[in-house]
Every structure is written in C-alpha cells, then in structure tokens.
Image (cartoon, rainbow, N blue to C red):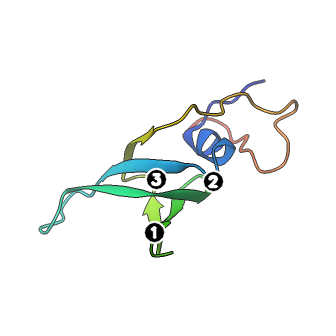
Amino acid sequence: IEQSYIENILRLNRGKLASVYATFEGNNQWNAKNFVGIIEAAGRDHLILSDPQTGQRTLIPMVAFDYATFDEELEYEYPFGAGPGLSTFPPR
C-alpha cells in the first residue's frame, strides 16, 4: 500500500535543495518564515535542513510546515514494500 505522507516525500528527496515555508502562530517578531537548505532528515514531527553555504542546520517542526518548493524534479515513487526509513503510521 502506497502511503503518501509529507515526511516520506521529504525523505525520498534527501540531499535536494528546498525552500520551506512555515508559519509560527503567536510569534511577535515573525509569523511566517522561508527556510532554504538541503534536506538532511525528516520525521513525523520535524524536518532538518542544512544551509549549503554556512552549514547551519535548522530543525523545523512539522506543525509549522506549510509547503516546500524545489527547483528540480522530485522523487515520488516509493520503494517496493516501503523499505526502511519510510513511515507507515496510521492516519492522524
């Protein structure tokens, strides 16, 4: 069974440069923010990006994740059997 969770799509595209848009409710300094970086990891509740110029890593909670854009084609085909590293959690 194919399971199309955002964290799985992000994992399939590890190593690619992404622009991630996130919204942080209740933040007085900035409510929405754009992060640009290489996808290092993605979990059910987080995404880790690294800045290719500085090496700085950013941990973004998935509750703040709005969407991501890429300047290249995305991997979307799941390996047969949803191999190791892909989430198979029941729907929320």
Quarter of the rendering occupied by the N terminus: top right
Q: Relative to residue 84, is residue 51 depicted above or below?
A: below
Residue occupying image coordinates x 84% and y 49%: 84
Q: Residue at x 66, y 33 (%)?
A: 75
Residue 70, given in percent of the width and then of the height, sits at 47, 39
Under tag 3, what secondary structure?
A: loop
The answer to whether residue 64 is above or below residue 50 is above
Q: Mark 2 points at which residue?
A: 15
Q: Is residue 46 visible?
A: no
Q: Position of residue 63 (x, y in %)?
A: 41, 52
Image location of residue 11, percent across then percent down: 66, 47
Q: Which of 91 and 9 is in front in this view?
A: 9
Mark 1, residue position: 58
Task: State which quadrant residue 7 falls in.
Answer: top right
Whether residue 41 is visible to the viewer of this picture, yes or no, is yes
Q: Cβ–Cβ below 8 Å for labels 3 and 2?
A: no
Residues packed near mark 1 inside 10 Å, few (<14), some (14 to 19) or many (20 plus)? some
Instruction: Please name the residue that numbered disc 3 is placed on.
Output: 62
Left or right: residue 31 compared with residue 17: left
Say the numbered circle drawn on residue 84. none
Q: Which of marks 3 and 2 is nearer the N terminus?
A: 2
Circle 1 sits in a helix, a strand or a loop, which is it?
Answer: strand
| In the image: residue 6, left or right of residue 70 | right
Report, in whole angstroms, how far the alpha carbon at label 3 lies from the one at label 2.
18 Å
Give amino acid for label 3. Answer: Met
Q: How many labels does the image show?
A: 3
The Cα atoms of the two marked residues, 1 and 3, are separated by 12 Å
- List the single residue furthest toward the top: 1
The label nearer to you, 3 versus 2, is: 2
Give the secondary structure at mark 2: loop
Which quarter shows the C terminus?
top right
Which residue shows up at 77% across the image and 51% down it?
A: 85
